[in-house]
Amino acid sequence: MKYLVLLLFLLASSALAAESRGPFYSPITGFTDALVPVLAGFEKASVETTLRGFIARADSFPGYRNSDSEPSEYGLYLNVAVRDAEEVKALSDLSEPKGAVTHRLVQIPAPKGGDQAMVIQIDYGPKASAESIRAIDECIAGIKRFSREN
């Protein structure tokens, strides 16, 4: 529990520091409202920063052990990364089933005058935490709005 509190403090601190530049310069700030439901809504969960963003994994304990990127019917995999603005020309949001898992790929163009776009990959099983999926959807909607309005 104390690690969760420390993680939340670090996320809030980084959100305040990056607020003026938005989620395209610190992708994890665009998902702060989703990370608590993800971390609390599954048997096993983790968030790992990457060079260009972060990866959140959450699943049942056996599902988490079975694969680093393929969730079980109870799990989810969220990969958020910034890309050069030239790589993402237009907004796209596509979902398709991959077996029992839903695969969603969202590409959000850079805000006006920005040099970074965002690519979001989320894979989740039919029994994944509905609250977590809803929170991620709301964060994605907020990042889309930010891109349009700035």
Image (cartoon, rainbow, N blue to C red):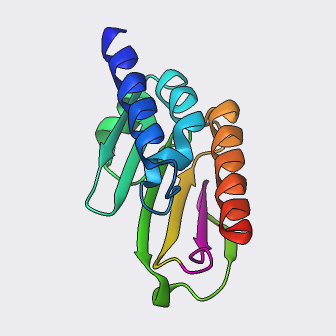
Quadrant in which the N terminus is drawn: top left
At 73% from the left and 70% from the top, the residue drawn is 148
At 52% from the left and 27% from the top, the residue drawn is 36
Residue 133: where, in percent of width, then height? 65, 42
Which image quarter: residue 123? bottom right
Q: Is residue 12 magenta?
A: no
Q: Nearer the viewer, residue 120 or 15?
A: 15
At 46% from the left and 79% from the top, the residue drawn is 115
Residue 45: where, in percent of width, then height? 40, 31
Q: Nearer the viewer, residue 41 or 70?
A: 41
Magenta segment boundaries in residue numbering? 98-113
Q: Please indicate whether residue 43 sits to the left or right of residue 136 in the image.
A: left
Quadrant in which the C terminus is drawn: bottom right
Q: Is residue 103 magenta?
A: yes
Q: Nearer the viewer, residue 38 or 145?
A: 145
At 44% from the left and 49% from the top, the residue drawn is 18
Residue 140: where, in percent of width, then height? 65, 55
Q: Please indicate whether residue 107 sits to the left or right of residue 87 in the image.
A: right
Q: Relative to 41, is 28 above or below?
A: below
Q: Nearer the viewer, residue 4 or 13?
A: 13
Q: In this rendering, does residue 103 appear at all? A: yes
